[in-house]
Image: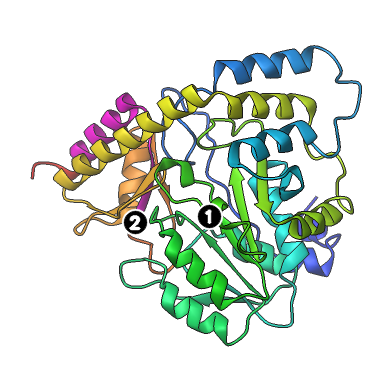
Amino acid sequence: MASSSVSSFYSPRLAALEPYVPGEQPRIANLVKLNTNENPYPPSPHAVDAVQQAAASGLERYPDPESLALREAVAQRHGLGVDEVFAGNGSDEVLAHAFFAFFRQSEPLLCPDVTYSFYRVYAQRYEIDCELQSVDDALRIDVDALAARASRGCGGIVLANPNAPTGIGLPLGEIVKLLQACPHRVVLVDEAYVDFGGASALPLIEQYPNLLVVQTLSKSRALAGLRVGFACGQAHLIEAMTRGKNTFNSYPLGRPAVAGAVAALQDEAWFDQTCKAVIDTREGLTLELEDLGFEVLPSQANFVFARHPQRDAAELALALRERAVLVRHFRAPRIAQYLRISIGTRAQCSALIDALADILGPA
């Protein structure tokens, strides 16, 4: 059937949407895959065992619709009440529920112009007016300008900390400025990468009723394949998100996902070991990229954002792909000359550097 005939079945709202394009998941032999910020190390062995045990029996029954065991594990780890934790099918779904619950206000949602592009997709999907605030020339979020704009009235603020795709983190004092500038609307802080060196806003929850913090187990806990995320905030915010969830999907997390997530959260030794390995490799990779002439932004995430002053980023990405090394290139304004490079194992990062050295030629 022709594509035009298929699209005739679309609702007008669907036809108007511009979907998010996820990172490529190709099937290439011996691929060095550094394009989707996955953890290069496997999850905790305890998490793998828990998933297998959960899958061995009970799959004929629906899971707990409230994911209570997972919420208890998150609450215990972060010193929160269970009623201050919401669990969902990956942080992307958690973010979607938050956008639906809090941001369709009469005033615009404020968001940096260089950040996770899914925010603008959600805003379009839920018909939220989204006003982009420019990052500065160093691609840092301009907190003072954002706070000044918020103080004049807004429908809320959403930002990633550390930011994506730059990897640049904000100290907690800057988050406090935004919370105080926007006291009557929700400030959503997406902390997908916080465990790789960022400062979490979770300790601010009891003080600020407008703060919602979203995290994922896909990155630092190496559970991208299970799709587990959570949000933390005061109970009234979690109640609102639960209300929205139960109009969409009462059972977002299956038994194996909950079991694996709980076991991963409880294995602090594995978490510490793998996070340290990623951070150490990131610092080494940054130095090696700079030796090749790249400019690398300061990162507190499991990736780096880099550009080469003399080489086109799109051409570099293509040349790397031809050598079975995959990185992420964005064609968006202001960042089109940058490559986002996920932190792999030391061997994977060495393969990247070797490929780049071959592409760039003699210094």
Give residue 206's position: percent from left, percent from top: 63, 57
* Magenta region, main secondary structure: helix
| The quarter of the displayed image where residue 284 is located | top left
The reply to whether the magenta stretch includes residue 355 is yes
Question: Which stretch did the figure color magenta?
Answer: 339-358
Closer to the camera: disc 2 or disc 1?
1
Q: Is residue 267 visible?
A: yes
Q: Position of residue 278 (x, y in %)?
A: 37, 33
Q: Which residue is mark 2?
A: 338
| Position of residue 30 in the picture relative to residue 245 (left or right) | left
Q: Which mark is residue 89?
A: none
323 or 135, nearer to the observer: 135
C-alpha gap between disc 2 and disc 1: 28 Å
Residue at horizontal 8 percent and vertical 45 percent from the top: 363
Q: Is residue 209 magenta?
A: no
> Residue 169: x percent and y percent?
40, 56
Q: Nearer the viewer, residue 149 or 81?
A: 81
- Which kind of residue does numbered mark 1 sit on? Ala
Q: Is residue 170 above or below residue 124?
A: above
Q: Of callouts 2 and 1, which one flags the residue occurring earlier in the amino acid sequence?
A: 1
Frontmost residue, 32 versus 69: 69
**Residue 227 in view:** no
Helix, strand or loop status at disc 2: loop
Position of residue 81 measured from the top left corner of the image (x, y, whole percent):
71, 45
Q: Which residue is mark 1?
A: 201
- Up the image or down, 210 lies above or below 235; here it is below
Vertical placement of residue 75 versus 171, above or below = above
